[in-house]
Image (spheres, rainbow, N blue to C red):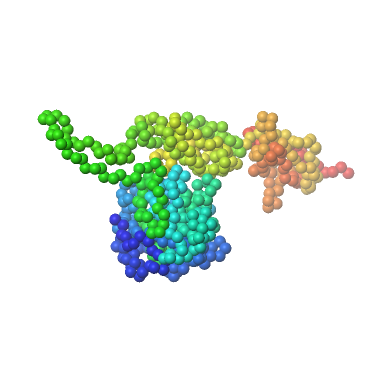
Amino acid sequence: MAAQFGRRLRRGATTTAVAAVAVAALSASQGPGAVLASDGGGGDQRTAGSAPSDDSAATGNSPYYTDLPPLVTPNKPGTSTNLPITGSAESGIPASVLDAYKKAQRSIASSDAACRLPWQLLAAIGKVESGQARGGRVDANGTTFSPILGPVLNGQGFAMIKDTDNGAYDGDSTHDRAVGPMQFIPSTWATWGQDGNDDGRKDPNNIYDAALAAGHYLCAGSRDLAIAADLDRAVLSYNHSNEYLRTVRSWFDYYKRGTHEVPDGTGVVPPPLDGGTDPSPNPGTSPSPTPPAKPKPDPKPPKPGGGSTDPKPSPSTPPSTQPPKPSQTLAGVENAGTGALTATAGDAFAERIKVRAKNSLGGPLAKVSVTFTIAGDTDARFEGGKSAVTLTTGSDGTVTAPVLQAGETTGKFTVRAIATGRSLPAVMYTATVTARQADAIARTDDKALTAAPGAEFADAVEVKATYKGAIASGVAVTATMITDGDTPAENDKGPYFKDADGKTVRTLTELKTDADGTLQLPKIYADDTAGTYKLRLTTEGGATVVIELTVEAPAA
């Protein structure tokens, strides 16, 4: 059981005795000794692009949970952290919450790799700030069912922060309150808020948005969170308290030793906040069942040799205590007949991804939330520019993803469909984007192309590509000076191009036709060897044109 010494700390009211208990509890846990960097608890002074200052702590130094991890860690040092979905309840993190932390880590690894943000640090802060979004009480998009609000920051036991958002986020137009699973005060959210689930909104009550915002906040000021001193300064900038740092550090080390995913809404729920708002339970779920009434003895004695003396089930027992029927139990999602996913760069995929949710009997299951996510090195997006969408299955158990639009990046990528917030296998689809093609290419004029030895060709070479008679824009073209003969090769003499460094080259790649399907080649130069030469242009798709170039001295 977690060591506890008071649920909330008040700014300016933390005693030395409480701090001593915290240190003692950490020592007793036999967890890894977190080396705390000495910076006086002041955090960083914020300059442009640097870490926030003391006056702009993410939480406004609002109260926080001080529960410590269990004395027995979820795993021993040196052993695997791939734990099964069992073990200490405290090491279980709700599925959507855990996914949000890991997604934030991946996002920041792409945009700020030098920060080296570990998702376990976000999990530790999320545990201390809101008990992992109140045990994962979030909807299919990761938004809490009701706002998580900290106490009113009116200076009465807490910090004094007057209203900065006119109550838009916290419902209080007089003072601020920390908001959401990562407990941002509104003024901080206005600066650091993010759209972590690509729904076009920045919502502090959405775990994906809040986790990504917390990651950016912790990484500010060119911090490297793999360095203990930088990590400590980042945590202190979140809430300026050494006790807060020790508490976050203890959960950080605990989660690094191992954790596992649990279904949304089944995580450990902390008690209501002191002065804060406890969100309502998940919509559609039953309250905690009350013990059934004790059965009264049957006044009539049982008949000899027949009848049962077992009491009838109490009518007060709520239906939610009964195990779900197999026809209502989600067994997984499967491909519902999606064909090959192939499209040319810039075009929409003709085929749409379709999945089917099935119950334990193999039949269709309606009203199941399914999330489609695009992964891989691609700029393909669903209709509306989204990389992830969440939809619900219909009465036939199926749901179809929006139209998939290919970008300019060619190659393969993956689309993943999974039951939202469930620990069930995903359905994986491979999609392919091919380069634009042309089946014909020709010059736009028929001027003779001549130059004197050692001079440049006065007229530019311009060509136009088409595909099935229509303009072929964005088509890759290769230009090569070739030799004569049945098997032409790159010529080592005659006309040539110049690369960016001014060096002689006789082959150009990475050329593309413009929106009108035309391409004008760079300047062509002649060497000192007179004669007639050939320039070959080849498109993606195999269309070819050969152009004649003449190098000759001008007439007297």
Q: Report the front residue among 534 and 52.
A: 52
Residue 18 drawn at (x, y percent): 34, 67
Q: Report the front residue among 241 and 334.
A: 241
Residue 278 visible, this angle: yes
- Identify the residue at image location x=37%, y=30%: 362
- Identify the residue at image location x=31%, y=38%: 319
- Identify the residue at image location x=54%, y=43%: 386
Please identify the quadrant where the N terminus is shown.
bottom left
Q: Report the front residue among 520 and 320.
A: 320
Residue 222 visible, this angle: no
Residue 23 drawn at (x, y percent): 33, 66
Q: Quadrant of residue 537?
A: top right
Residue 463 drawn at (x, y percent): 73, 37
- Identify the residue at image location x=40%, y=53%: 278
| Residue with the most extreme left position | 304
Rendered view: 38 above or below 531 = below
| Residue with the most extreme front position | 299
Q: How many marks?
A: 0
Please identify the quadrant where the C terminus is shown.
top right
Rendered view: 27 above or below 148 = below
Rendered view: 125 above or below 484 = below
Q: Is residue 1 left or right of residue 393?
A: left
Q: Report the front residue among 358 and 171.
A: 171
Residue 160 drawn at (x, y percent): 47, 65
